[in-house]
Image (spheres, rainbow, N blue to C red):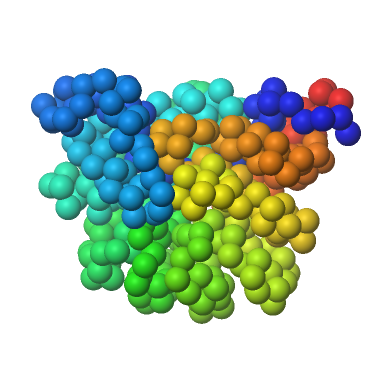
Amino acid sequence: MSKVTKEFIYGMPKAELHIHLEGSLEPELKLKLAKKNNIDLGMDTVEAIKETYQFDDLSSFLDVYYQGMEVLQDRDDFYNLAMEYFKTAQKHNVKYAEVFFDPQAHTTRGVAFEEVIEGYYKATQAAKKLGIKANLIMCFLRDMSAESALEHYQMAKAYQDWILGIGLDSDERDNPPLKFAELFKMAKNDGYKITMHCDIDQKDSIKHIEAVLYQIGAQRIDHGTNIIEDQSLVDYAVENEIGFTKCPVSNRFVTGDLKSKEIKSLLDQGIKVTINSDDPAYFQSYISDDIYTLAQAVELTKAEIIQLAKNSFEVAWISEAEKKNYLAQIAKYVEKED
C-alpha cells in the first residue's frame, strides 16, 4: 500500500478509548471558566498557561493537571468541557468514544458528584448529534484511599445506567492495582466493564500488569507497554484478546520516549493495540495526531493503520452488531481511498 498520509488517518473511522475529559481542558476554555467562576489562575493568557505545561514525569504532569480542574464548578462547566472534546473528536472522525472522568478530583474541591456526572452525561447524549456515540468510564484516583473509592462507588449507584465501566488512574507509585481489588471485584459483579492504568516504566510495572490480568481480570489495560518485558504476559493478552490503549505522545511528555518501537512490536505480535490521545489539551495532540506521530516514528503501513482502527472497535465495549457496523465503515472508507 502507498505511504500513509495525515489526511488518510484523520478520515479513518475510529474509536477513542483512552481520553480523560479533564485532560481535554484547553487553555481558552480554562480562561473562560476561570473568569465565569471568579477563579484567579495567576495567568491571563493562553501563552502563559501553555508555558506551565513542562512535564518530565507523571507526577509533574499531575500537579498541573489537577490545578487546572479548579475552574470546573458546575454541571454546565462539565457539559461544556465534554462538548468541546466531542466537537474536536468529530474532526478526527471518531465515531465512538469511551471517556474517563475522575469524580474524586471534584468532590474533594466541594463540587457535588451529581454536578459532575449530570454535566458529562448530558454531553454524551448531545454528542449523538455530532455522529458520535459516547459512554462514560468512572475512574478512581489510586493515590487516594480504597475507602474513598468505595464511597464514590456508592455515590454512583443512582447513576449506574449512565456508567459503562470503572477505571483506575493517577499516580501509580506505591498504589498497586491490588489496593483496589475488592472494589473492582464488586464492580465486575455489578456488571461494570473494567480497565486499569498501568503506566509506563513505573516501579513494579510487570508485577502490576500481572495482577491486573490474572487477579483482577480487567478486560483492558490503559498504557501497559511494559508488558513487552514478559513474553508469557504478552501471550496471555493475545490469547484472551485484552485491549491495550496506548498514548504515544503523552508517553514522550512524561518519559521522554514515544515507546513507538515497543507499541509496534506488540501490534506485530497480535496484541489488540489501540492509539488514543490521553490528555490532549496538555499534550497538544488529539487521536489522529497520535496515530500520525506513531506512524512517522516506526513507518507504519496503511494496513497497520487500518488494523489499529479495527482494534479500537473490536476492544470497545459495544455489541457485536455495532462492531460489525463500524468495521464495515472502515472497509468502505478504505475502498474509497484506494
Q: Position of residue 95 (x, y in %)?
A: 59, 33
Residue 325 visible in the current orientation: no
Say left or right for 134 vs 288: left
Residue 330 placement: quadrant: top right
Which residue corresponds to the image point at 17% horizontal and 52% vertical from the top-left? 108
Which residue corresponds to the image point at 25% horizontal and 50% vertical from the top-left? 105
Which residue corresponds to the image point at 41% horizontal and 33% vertical from the top-left? 281
20 vs 79: above or below: below
Say left or right for 28 vs 57: left
Q: Position of residue 232 (x, y in %)?
A: 69, 77
* Nearest the eye: 261 or 304: 261
206 vs 258: above or below: below
* Nearest the eye: 5 or 197: 5
Which residue corresponds to the image point at 25% horizontal and 69% vertical from the top-left? 145
Residue 150 placement: quadrant: bottom left
Say left or right for 115 vs 248: left
Say left or right for 46 vs 10: left
Residue 23 placement: quadrant: top left
104 vs 207: above or below: above
